[in-house]
Amino acid sequence: MCAAPRRSRRDGREPSRKPLLRAAVDCFARLGYQGTTIDRIARDAGVTKGAVYYHFRDKEQLLFEAVKDHVGEFERQVLAEVTPELDAMAALRRVVDVCFFHATVSNHRRFIITLMVEALDTNPALSVEFRNILRRMRVFLADVVRRGQQRGALRHDVSAEAAAAAIAGGIMGAEIQHYQDREQVDLRAILDTLVEQLAAWLAPRGAEARKASGGGTRTW
């Protein structure tokens, strides 16, 4: 198989990768991997197919680069927003807020979730990549929960890993419903409800709550 033609660097007019990645993300988010073509990406970016092939070997490489770029951006924003100084529930709310931003202001989350579902049976390599993304998210959330437990702000009898999986599932499930039925599913309201339910579920109980608030059993 012949390699795709590459444009010469001498003319100095090669488009940067960023506009191509943005156009690709938009196409993949709306049309899925199978429904997106290099022609469509080039047209949406306002460039020729040759300009796309200058930077990317094929559609699969473009997809992987787009996933890596946007997941990296999302993870950096979460890390910037969620600092170790935050109490656990404030940290979880920040995570939810970042997810809401990317789900509504940008098309990042739709892009990721659309491809994640599509890749389950059609693209083993991409499926592995998404599995690793989800694992990193659960590890991060479990660490937030564990820090809250260590500080006495969250109940100790709940597995941090199980809580992380429930939180991630709640966020993604809400987003999928929102994407499928925006008229009926208010994503902000659902995510706010999720945070309220998490706060009630993970709140310390009984003696554990008294200890966390500085109380405890009084001795005479």
Image (cartoon, rainbow, N blue to C red):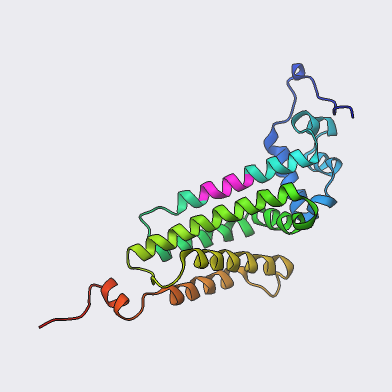
Q: Is residue 185 above or below residue 218?
A: above
Q: Residue at x 32, y 63 (%)?
A: 151
Q: Is residue 73 left or right of residue 211?
A: right
Q: Magenta region's main secondary structure? A: helix
Q: Is residue 34 left or right of residue 177?
A: right
Q: Quadrant of the N terminus?
A: top right
Foreground of the two, 45 or 36: 36
Q: Is residue 105 left or right of residue 57?
A: left
Residue 66 placement: quadrant: top right
Q: Position of residue 15 (x, y in %)?
A: 73, 30
In reply to whether residue 130 is colored magenta, the answer given is no
Q: Quadrant of the C terminus?
A: bottom left
Foreground of the two, 159 or 172: 159
Q: Is residue 19 above or below residue 95?
A: above
Q: Residue at x 22, y 77 (%)?
A: 216
Q: Which residues are magenta?
A: 70-77
* Count of numbered tags: 0
Foreground of the two, 169 or 109: 169
Q: Residue at x 66, y 52 (%)?
A: 130
